Image (cartoon, helix red, strand yellow):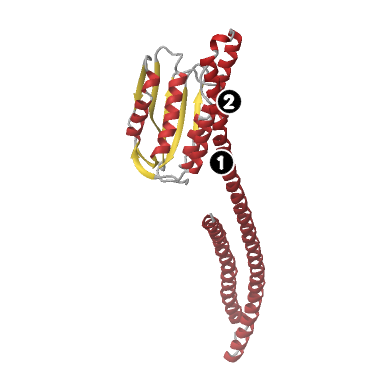
Amino acid sequence: MQDEAEIEDNSLSGLATSVSEPRRSSQNTRLAVPLLIAAIIMLFGMSIFQVVKHLLLPNVSLAESNIITVLFSSVVATIAAYFILRNRQALLEQTLKEIAERKRAEAEIKALNKDMEYHIVQLESANKELESFSYSVSHDLRAPLRHISGYVELLLKNVSSALDEKSLRYLTTISQSANRMGLLIDDLLTFSRIGRIEMQKTKFSLDRLVEEVVDDLEDETKGREIIWERGPLPDVYGDRSLMKLAFLNLVANAIKFTTPRKQARIEIGTASSADDETVVFIRDNGVGFNMKYADKLFGVFQRLHSPDQFEGTGIGLANVQRVIHRHGGKTWAEGEVDGGATFYISIPKSIKGE
């Protein structure tokens, strides 16, 4: 991080130097112009003087002519030197002013870099504390939650015959809520781990990875008519296990939200992108979403549909965004209500993140 600050400082200082170069060139130009003008005036003046001298003073001796010529040249040179020195002084004052401004700008840049470095350290510390807190809380909640689920199951097994329908419904609601809470905790732990684990970067086939993801989700597609359209995918560089987690969430998301369709269609391919990145999209003909809420899609526990419509915890897309951000990429989505959705991820061809 310090190296990055130094690099930025050096680059900004280099920028200030590069900006000063045209100024220095402009100063030289401004100095050369009066010198050239003075030289032209002197030559023109000497020529006129020689003509006038021969016309008005034809009988002047050689010694007197030389004395007059020297005196005239001295006067012209003095006048030219005066204007040159005055211009030179103005240029010197301007140069000193620019040097002072440059030093002040460099001092401001250093102060900004130092302030930015401080805030980066504070932000990283806060993120680590938040991750540690969420991990600890989620981990500590698992034990009492297991007790609740276990005792509810025992009650349903041993005394269900002695309970009325209303009491059984209460116990069933408690059991379902405990199970949902368990899923939330598991997803929260996964979300926390994504930011904590060290990335194992390697080059791998994205085509093969997506094929594995589709195979892993085969149980969720049983009994459904899904048309898969998969274009060729390139090799990418990154953490394969994290990238697989991201694609598992994206493809599972497409499978889930195309459930109401008699014939679902899911397309996976690449989109046009800059030379230094690969953009992959997952498009479906599902229920879609309102673009007004697109900024909520990748937030933790953000859901655009109720649990009664589609099950889930609201962390899947947040995991996708965190994985892609750790690779230095971006996530975004497009969609329309009842018109399907397209999710995009960009993967740098060289790691920019951790």
Q: Earlier in the sequence, mark 2 or mark 1?
A: 1
Q: Quadrant of residue 34?
A: bottom right
**Residue beneath disc 1:** 131
- Categorize mark 1 by other alpha carbons within 10 Å: few (<14), some (14-19), many (20+): many
Horizontal and vertical percent for residue 333? 50, 28
Q: Secondary structure at mark 2?
A: helix
Q: Quadrant of residue 345?
A: top left
Mark 2 and mark 1: Cα distance apart in space:
26 Å
Q: Which amino acid type is shown beneath numbered disc 1?
A: Glu
**Residue beneath disc 2:** 293
Horizontal and vertical percent for residue 18? 53, 60
Identify the residue at the far top of this view.
165
Horizontal and vertical percent for residue 23? 58, 62
341, above or below 35, in the image:
above
271, above or below 218, in the image:
below
Could you say which is closer to the camera, residue 109 or residue 113? 113
